[in-house]
Image: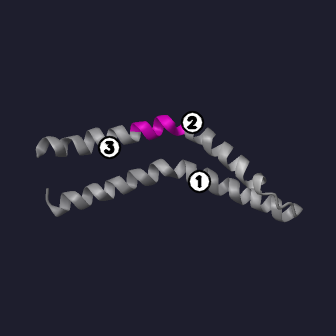
Amino acid sequence: MNETILFDMLRQSLLIAVRISAPLLGVALITGVVIGLFQALTSVQEMTLTFVPKVGLMLVVFWVSMSFMTTALSDFYLGQIIPLIAES
């Protein structure tokens, strides 16, 4: 395996990691901003108010996007990793 293949595989791996984590991180960001605005407007500074809804929504999004994540990882593995192993 030469450097070009290694760097290309690393780039594709990082891209897959970003695609897989984007739904969870996006929901956490949006939920955090909405709850932060609510806390700033109402002066309610309760720690569980930020934690519980964020974790709940992240679990729902994880459950909904689990098939997408599994498909993306298996396609990457079968399309990129297995041919490199078979080539060696």
Q: Is residue 22 left or right of residue 49?
A: left
Which numbered marker is on residue 64? 2
68 w.r.t. 15: above or below: above
Q: Is residue 4 left or right of residue 23?
A: left
Q: Earlier in the sequence, mark 2 or mark 1?
A: 1
Measured from the top left, where is residue 79 in percent x and y? Answer: 26, 41
**Magenta residues, start to end:** 64-71
Q: Is residue 27 left or right of residue 34?
A: left
Q: Amino acid at mark 1?
A: Gly
Q: Secondary structure at mark 1?
A: helix
The kind of secondary structure the magenta stretch mainly shows is helix
Q: Is residue 1 left or right of residue 43?
A: left
Question: Who's the residue at 40% across and 36% down the image?
Answer: 71
Q: Between marks 2 and 3, how big is the CA–CA gap?
A: 20 Å
Residue furthest to the front: 47
Which numbered marker is on residue 26? 1
Q: Amino acid at mark 3?
A: Phe
Find out whether residue 8 is within the magenta segment: no
Neighbourhood count class around disc 1 (C-alpha, 10 Å): few under 14, some 14–19, many 20 upward: few
Question: Who's the residue at 62% across and 50% down the image?
Answer: 27
Q: Earlier in the sequence, mark 3 or mark 1?
A: 1
Q: Between marks 2 and 1, how big is the CA–CA gap?
A: 14 Å
Q: Amino acid at mark 2?
A: Val
Question: Who's the residue at 76% across and 61% down the image?
Answer: 36
Quadrant for the N terminus in the image: bottom left
Neighbourhood count class around disc 3 (C-alpha, 10 Å): few under 14, some 14–19, many 20 upward: some
Decide: marks 3, 1 in contact (CB < 8 A)? no
The residue to which callout 3 is attached is 76
Measured from the top left, where is residue 47 in percent x and y? Answer: 77, 57
Measured from the top left, where is residue 5 in percent x and y? Answer: 19, 57
Q: Earlier in the sequence, mark 2 or mark 3?
A: 2
